[in-house]
Amino acid sequence: MSEFPAADELLSIAIPVAREAAATARRMRAEAITDVQTKSTRTDVVTAADRAVERQVVVALRTIRPYDGVLGEEYGEYTAGPGAVRWILDPIDGTVNYLYGLPAYAVSLAAEVDGVVLAGVVINAATGDEWTATRGGGAWRGGRRLRCSNRTDLSQVLLGTGFGYDAKRRAHQGAVLAQLITRVRDIRRIGVASLDLCSVGEGLLDAYYEKGLNPWDHAAGGLVAAEAGAVVGGLEGAPPGLDMVVAAPPAIFGPLHDALVELDAAGGA
Ligand code: LIP
């Protein structure tokens, strides 16, 4: 008998907590964007809502499961006790969209046990659209089981990507994209990694790649994409992580991976 909750139980904890967090994000946006500060660069912003939503989620999770850990974008890690669940949270993924009022910013919450993400939920707080997944239990949206794209030709791929906040990194990412854009159908830049990954899971994008993502950006959305049949990984056998996250249908992952390696997409600043 495992001492860990089953994936379904973890998801049943995550969904209401994430929904309440999305409601707070939506309400605070409607009231006013306050206390806008910057982090790594002048364009890497954090608002009072980011911080309030993260505090709300941490309190809710630790009330339900006091010994669990939480890794959040804004307040870092509350370490877990032995054998505890580690919750991975982006309180508002797509903060620049949130700042501008573009209707794409997400609460992303995943439950990880011994380094393996077992359950995840991503909610577009602007629209209420919700994606969920459990390891081995599939990916879902609105009661519908999701399947990723079945593309086999890279030139027909609608490809999502994103860029960092550092100008030197963006220069390299732009140079890579300038080469890649002629090899695919087209590019989409939503500005929200968790929604990009859920879009791959739903087939709204055929594939996605991005360098520089943190665990809170891709933990939940990566499970949605993987449970919908996409291959989710890094380059040259690495797991998805800071160097690169790639999500693509099985027939596309290889050609996209090879193009990203050829173009040194994981390189640069
Ligand atoms: C965002 C990511 C997105 C990336 C943006 C930004 P944030 O996260 O979700 O994929 O391209 O530059 O990093 O900063 O809004 O939480």
Image: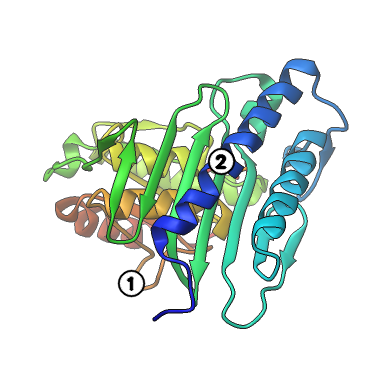
Residue 215's place in the image compared with 3, above or below, is above
Q: Name which residue lies at 54% across and 55% down.
A: 213
Question: In the image, which disc is placed on residue 41?
Answer: none
| Label 2 CA crowd tier, 10 Å (few <14, some 14–19, many 20+) | few
Q: Is residue 61 left or right of residue 132?
A: right
Q: Which one is nearer the viewer's eye here, 102 or 55?
A: 55
Residue 265 at least partly seen: no
> Which residue in the structure is indicated by mark 2?
16
| Label 1 CA crowd tier, 10 Å (few <14, some 14–19, many 20+) | few
Q: Name which residue lies at 51% across and 21% down.
A: 127
Q: Quadrant of residue 132?
A: top left
Rendered location of residue 30, percent (x, y): 73, 16
Q: Quadrant of the N terminus?
A: bottom left
Rendered location of residue 120, percent (x, y): 46, 52
Q: Which one is nearer the viewer's eye here, 223 or 151?
A: 223
Q: Quadrant of ligand 1?
A: top right
Q: Earlier along the polypeptide chain: callout 2 or callout 1? A: 2
User: Distance from label 2 to label 1 (Cα)?
Assistant: 37 Å
Residue 9's place in the image compared with 79, above or below, is above
**Label 1 lies in ligand 1 vicinity (Cβ under 8 Å):** no
Rendered location of residue 78, percent (x, y): 74, 67
> Is label 2 in a helix, a strand or a loop?
helix
> Which residue in the structure is indicated by mark 1?
236
Q: Quadrant of residue 185?
A: top left
Residue 75's place in the image compared with 108, above or below, is below
Three-letter amino acid code of the residue under disc 1: Glu
CB-based contact (under 8 Å), mark 2 and mark 1 = no
Residue 187 at least partly seen: yes
Q: Is residue 65 left or right of residue 185?
A: right
